[in-house]
Image (cartoon, rainbow, N blue to C red):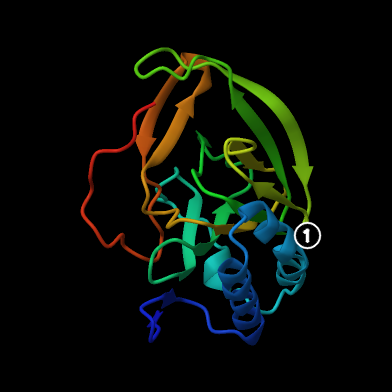
Amino acid sequence: MTTMSDGAVLHVRSPVLKAFLEAVRQTVEREPDRAQVIRALRPSFARLLADSSWLPEEFRQPDPSGGMGEGVGNYLIYRSAARDLSLMSLVLGPGVSTPVHDHLAWGIVGLYAGRQEEWVYRRTDANGEGGPVDLTVVEHNRLSPGDFYDLLPPEGDIHQVRTTSAEPSASIHLLGNDIGCVWRHRYEPEEHRVQPFRSGYSNEPCPEPLQSGPTG
C-alpha cells in the first residue's frame, strides 16, 4: 500500500491504472453532474476492463472470510483522501453469490474476469422505517468480461450478483464513496427485511470504529 502525497490510498501501481485515475480526477473536478461524469468515463473504463495486465493476481482471489460472505473478496485498489471516491475489485468464487445489497453512490461497475448473473431490484414498499420491505426484480443480466453498467441511485442501486463460470469472477467498481467502509443496506427479500451492514475490505481496515448504520 502507498499513501499518496494528497492522503489518498493506492494499492496497485500500474501506468494503465494511473492513466484511468487521472481521467477520473479530471472528469469529476470538471463536471458536477454525475450522470455526465459516468458518460464521460465510459471509454476509459472500457479500456481498463479490456487490459489484463494491471490487476495483480492477489486482487483476483476469493476471500474465505469476506465481509459480504464466505468466498467473497473485496479488495481496495484506490481511495481518495476525502473518501468520496473508491476503486475496488469484487471477487466471487464459482457459484458464489453476494447478498442483495445497495451502494448508496453513483458509479460504474464492470466485469473483468469470469462470468456473472445479476439481478437488479427495485423497492416497491412505502420505504417506511421499520416496516416490511418489498423488492421486485426489474432486470436479470448475464455478464461477460468487458460488460459494465452504471449506478445512479435510486435506479439500479439494489442488486445481487453470482458467478456462473468455473473460475472466480472479478468485477471492478468505481464508486463515489468509500464503499467498503460506509454503512449501507443488506436485504433479505424472502423475509421482507433490511439491515445495515459494512462489507469492509479484504486488504484494508476501515479507518474509523464501527458506528450504527442507516435505517431501512
The vertical placement of 17 against 186, above or below, is: below
Q: Which is more toward the observer, 173 or 104?
A: 104
Residue visible at 38% across and 82% down in the picture:
6
The image quadrant of residue 91 is: bottom right
Q: Which x, y percent locates residue 32?
A: 58, 60
Residue 124 placement, left or right of 149: left
Quadrant containing the N terminus in the rendered view = bottom left
Task: Please rate how many residues cluster around mark 1, counting C-alpha atoms within 10 Å: few if below 14, some from 14 to 19, many from 20.
Answer: some
Residue visible at 37% across and 49% down in the picture:
182
Q: Which x, y percent locates residue 110?
A: 69, 56
Residue visible at 68% across and 38% down in the picture:
118
- Name the residue that disc number 1 marks: 146
Three-letter amino acid code at the position of disc 1? Gly
Residue 36 visible in the current orientation: yes
Residue 154 placement, left or right of 10: right
Secondary structure at badge 1 equals loop
Residue 168 visible in the current orientation: no
Residue visible at 73% across and 30% down in the picture:
139
Q: Which x, y percent locates residue 19?
A: 65, 82
The vertical placement of 170 against 103, above or below, is: below
Q: Which x, y percent locates residue 114?
A: 71, 55
Q: Number of numbered discs present?
A: 1
Quadrant containing the C terminus in the rendered view = top left
